[in-house]
Image (spheres, rainbow, N blue to C red):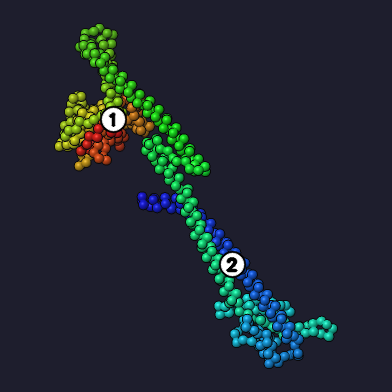
């Protein structure tokens, strides 16, 4: 399929179209000029041959005119035919049922020609005999009367001339015309190649520059040559690339400042949050002994402090992904045991239906695997409905963990944004809690695991029977590529 697409692209390319256009123009011009020249020359040559034959016949008839007596004898007809014949043709003389001709070559006198001559006209006709062209010219001799008028004699004279020399001249002229047309076509193709080269070179340069620009090389510029439309395109490209470079540079600077700001604020908040956490631990112990509103306030402060601590930790983790400093701490992990530990530590072991085959070992980062599984299972409890299931499967190259719930599932409008940062699917879930960073962090942690061209993935979808399904696929052999994204 790729081969045929490449062939189709080449056939429909600008070079081929220019060649076809110039070639079609050359062929059309050649055909028109050659055909016009052929027919015009053919008409002129045949007309000249015809006029010369008529003049020759008239001159010869003047020499033998008038006829001595009528009706003539056969010998007189033979003599007249011999006298009217020459090396350019021969004559045929017809008087009623008698006929004589100056050559043994049969003369194809057609009924139409004889009718015209019988009516007293000078007539001519071109015919083909044994594959050769012949010209037939006929006239009827007239007799003078005593009163000075003339009357038809009934004696018909036909001049038969071979047109092979004229036809050879026409054929030679046609051959020269077609050869000239062929040279014109060759010249048109050469001009098309030169034109295509002149047009395609800047177009190719523009294509290469556009690819480099699309790959992120914002310093790409074109060399402007000349003052034609292609030069205007090159100047426009350079202006656009310059504007894009400035805007992207400004956006990158702003993005870098925003990331640095989030990282700095998150780190600065860790110290007071640590002190607040210590205080909330004391409040948790005393909350049961505090009266009414004081107890509820203490529990609220403790919960919100934990939420804020989790948010700050998530922001710090996100800043590591953005800066490319996130690293994997790889180890040979029994995946079933690691998932079981994640569920047990968080008190979910009795609430989750686990299908975890043993002896599935993969080289992974156990902390990041714990974060991913915890986020997915916690998300299922918060936004879905029980029972929640975790299923493990593996093949020689991949480890797959599937987390599913029996809730309302994910709305199709939500699916493209599930892993966006700070996105909360309030419109698709019965409740919405958390910072909106858990799934984004899980997605980044999955992508950190890679081996060659194989990279971890985390995909969201809906099960056939309802409920959301999150599928984690990690390569069983992971190479630490650092924070490359």
Q: Is 304 located above or below residue 330 in the figure? A: above
Disc 2 is placed on an element classified as helix
- Name which quarter of the figure residue 385 lies in: top left
Could you tell me which residue is drawn at 53 percent across and 56 percent down? 25
In the image, residue 458 lies at what x, y percent?
28, 34
**Circle nearer the N terminus (2, 1):** 2
Q: Is 350 located above or below residue 271 in the figure? A: below
- Name which quarter of the figure residue 451 lies in: top left
Residue pointed to by mark 2: 38
Determine crowd level at label 2: few under 14, some 14-19, many 20+ residues with C-alpha closer than 10 A.
many
Left-right relation of 169 to 477: right
Q: Is residue 20 visible?
A: no
Q: Is 297 located above or below residue 344 in the figure? A: above
- Residue 47 is labelled as none
Residue pointed to by mark 1: 324
Could you tell me which residue is drawn at 74 percent across and 90 percent down? 71
The residues bearing labels 2 and 1 have C-alpha atoms spaced at a distance of: 79 Å
Determine crowd level at label 1: few under 14, some 14-19, many 20+ residues with C-alpha closer than 10 A.
few
Along the viewing direction, whichever of 336 and 251 lies nearer the viewer: 251
Q: Residue furthest right?
A: 147
Left-right relation of 56 to 164: right
């Amino acid at each position: 399929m790729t081969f045929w697409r490449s062939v189709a692209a080449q056939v429909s390319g600008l070079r081929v179209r220019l060649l076809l256009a110039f070639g079609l123009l050359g062929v059309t011009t050649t055909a028109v000029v050659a055909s016009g020249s052929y027919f015009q020359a053919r008409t002129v040559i045949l007309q000249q041959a015809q006029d010369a034959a008529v003049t020759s016949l008239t001159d010869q008839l003047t020499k033998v005119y008038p006829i001595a007596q009528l009706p003539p004898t056969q010998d007189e007809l033979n003599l007249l035919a011999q006298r009217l014949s020459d090396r350019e043709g021969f004559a045929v003389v017809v008087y009623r049922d008698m006929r004589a001709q100056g050559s043994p070559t049969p003369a194809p006198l057609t009924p139409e020609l004889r009718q015209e001559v019988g009516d007293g006209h000078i007539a001519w006709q071109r015919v083909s005999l044994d594959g050769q062209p012949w010209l037939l010219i006929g006239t009827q001799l007239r007799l003078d009367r005593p009163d000075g008028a003339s009357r038809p004699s009934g004696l018909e004279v036909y001049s038969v001339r071979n047109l092979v020399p004229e036809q050879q001249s026409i054929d030679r002229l046609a051959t020269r015309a077609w050869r000239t047309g062929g040279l014109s076509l060759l010249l048109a193709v050469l001009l098309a190649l030169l034109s295509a080269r002149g047009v395609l070179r800047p177009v190719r340069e523009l294509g290469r520059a556009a690819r480099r620009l699309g790959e992120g090389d914002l310093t790409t510029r074109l060399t402007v040559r000349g003052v034609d439309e292609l030069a205007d395109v090159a100047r426009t490209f350079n202006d656009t690339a310059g504007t894009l470079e400035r805007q992207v540079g400004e956006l990158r600077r702003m993005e870098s400042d925003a990331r640095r700001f989030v990282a700095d604020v998150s780190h600065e908040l860790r110290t007071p949050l640590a002190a607040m956490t210590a205080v909330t631990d004391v409040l948790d112990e005393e909350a049961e002994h505090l009266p009414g509103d004081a107890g509820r306030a203490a529990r609220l402060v403790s919960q919100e402090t934990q939420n804020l601590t989790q948010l700050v930790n998530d922001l710090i983790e996100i800043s590591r992904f953005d800066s490319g400093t996130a690293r994997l701490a790889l180890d040979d992990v029994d995946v079933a045991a690691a998932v079981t530990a994640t569920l047990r530590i968080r008190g979910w072991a009795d609430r989750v239906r686990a299908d975890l085959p043993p002896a599935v070992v993969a080289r992974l980062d156990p902390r990041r695997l714990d974060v991913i599984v915890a986020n997915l299972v916690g998300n299922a409890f918060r936004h879905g409905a029980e029972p929640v299931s975790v299923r493990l499967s593996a093949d020689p190259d991949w480890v797959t963990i599937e987390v599913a719930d029996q809730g309302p599932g994910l709305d199709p409008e939500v699916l493209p944004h599930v892993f966006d940062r700070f996105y909360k699917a309030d419109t698709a879930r019965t409740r919405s809690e958390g910072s909106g960073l858990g799934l984004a962090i899980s997605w980044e942690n999955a992508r950190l695991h890679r081996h060659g061209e194989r990279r971890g993935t985390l995909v969201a979808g809906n099960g056939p029977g309802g409920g959301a399904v999150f599928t984690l696929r990690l390569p069983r052999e992971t190479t630490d590529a650092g924070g490359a994204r």
